[in-house]
Amino acid sequence: MPDVIVKCPTCSKAVAWIAANKFRPFCSERCQLIDLGEWAEGNRRIPADPTHDQLSLDDIKGDQDS
Ligand SMILES: [Zn+2]
């Protein structure tokens, strides 16, 4: 079986659920810190990390804007 793939809770990027990925289920330390930070502040809105979020937002908006 291939590795289990999960979605990063922060940016929804596909992440391989493997022992080597110490940030799972996040795709990166960046997303992990963002999520933990949001929880710590009691605020689930994600204002930070625009480059990461734009990957999915642009995919949605790009088709409509152009
Ligand atoms: Zn991520």
Image (cartoon, grey):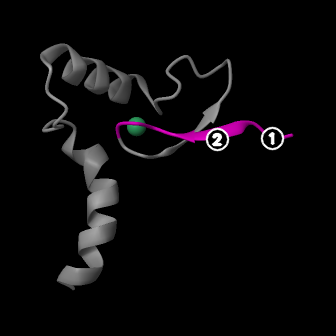
Q: Quadrant of the C terminus?
A: bottom left
Instruction: Determine if the magenta segment contains residue 5.
Output: yes
Quadrant of ligand 1 in image: top left
Residue 39: image quadrant is top left
Q: Quadrant of the rendered structure where residue 5 is?
A: top right
Residue 45, x across and y down, in percent: 16, 37
Q: Which residue is mark 2?
A: 5
Query: Residue lying farthest front?
Result: 42
What's the distance in space between the residues labelled 1 and 2, CA to CA? 9 Å
Between 66 and 42, the residue placed more toward the observer is: 42
Q: Is residue 32 left or right of residue 23?
A: left
**Residues rendered magenta in the picture:** 1-10
Tell me the crowding category of disc 2: few under 14, some 14 to 19, or many 20 or more residues within 10 angstroms, Cα based: few
Residue, disc 1: 2
Residue furthest toward the right?
Answer: 1
- Residue type for callout 1: Pro
Q: Secondary structure at mark 2?
A: strand
Residue 29 drawn at (x, y percent): 40, 22
Per the picture, the main secondary structure of the magenta-coloured stretch is loop
**What residue is drawn where x is 70% and y is 37%?**
4
Relative image position of residue 49 (x, y in whole percent) = 22, 38
